[in-house]
Image (cartoon, coloured by chain):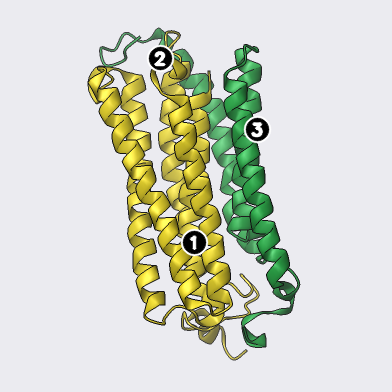
Amino acid sequence: MNSASDVAFAPDHTVPNRPTFGSATTGKVGMWIFLVTDAMTFGGLLLAYGILRVGNPHWPAPTSVLGIPFTAVMTFVLIVSSLTMVLALDAAKHGNRLGAVKWLLLTALGGIFFLCGQAYEYTHLIHHGFTLPSGNFPATFYVITSFHGGHVFTGVCYLLITAFGVFRGRHLENGANFVEITGLFWHFVDLVWILVFTLVYLIP
Amino acid sequence: MTEHAHPPELSAPDDHSSHRRDYFRIFWVLLVLTLVEVAVSYTKIDKRLMSAVMVALALTKAAFVGLYYMHLKYEKRSLLWLAALPLPLAGFYAVFLMLDGANLLRATTLPWIHH
């Protein structure tokens, strides 16, 4: 180690060994800091939902409005897409370029399936009068799930860009660090959905 | 990959077969816990108990995703703390703002609060 500034401004493509975050690259630490702030945004939205819900003794039972089996399938797809994401990273780490591309594309496909499911769900709900301005339950429901849906959409774009890069022979260096950072974002989207599914759909 | 890319603390869990096995194992855990959650939602147990069980299951699932799929378990502890430290704060807000906010809301007559 030379001076402190050499360590702090180490380029992203080298694997450091820092006293602070060990072998985590600057990109990875950056993604984690972003995810923590993003989690706070989700936390704020979920908190607003929680306050409105416990403050209203006549809050409808979510199961009376929302389709649990349908959403359970969407949840299943998102969990599968997390599995395909780690398999993509595994393939990329072992230099299996086309394998990584295959798993990344399957992960993106899972995200696209989820978005289609959400579009179908919204259409169905709106058709039955469950619209954004029709109450605090629909208002919080749409804000939280669409904010999450926006993350899924971002994640799909991110995955496709990563898959394209890997296909062109990039992103495999340093233990496929770029693919791992893409994965962090995607798993975060899955993680948030796990909480949203429980708190918004299942809590009686 | 090269020795350079894998510091000593990463070399053991980074073994090819064991990592893949972990990935699949976590997938089955997540799947089973989700099925349990959905099944619990169809039972007729006390609502508070049901809510507590579901939140516990959801947090367990989230922890598995964070620790294994996002590799927090294999990172330096400081990165784990970076992700974990805001959680008690969120819990604190959840408990106290919900208790306080709920009481205020129940007493309010503001037109945009639909009871």
What hue does chain A carry in this figure? yellow
**Residue A145 placement, left or right of A78:** left
Name the chain under label 1: A
Q: Are marks 3 and 1 on the same chain?
A: no
Q: Are marks 1 and 2 on the same chain?
A: no
Instruction: Where is residue A126? Give x, y as percent.
Output: 25, 24
Name the chain under label 2: B
* Secondary element at tag 1: helix
Q: Which residue is mark 1?
A: A183
The answer to which quarter of the image holds residue B38 is top right
In the image, A22 versus A113, the foreground residue is: A113
Q: Which residue is mark 2?
A: B105
Residue A192 shows in the view: no
| Residue A117, placed above or below residue A137 | below
Task: Determine the CA span between mark 1 and mark 2.
Answer: 40 Å
Instruction: Where is residue B52? Give x, y as percent.
Output: 64, 24
Task: Determine the CA span between mark 2 and mark 3.
Answer: 27 Å
Q: Which chain is green?
A: B
Q: Which residue is mark 3?
A: B56
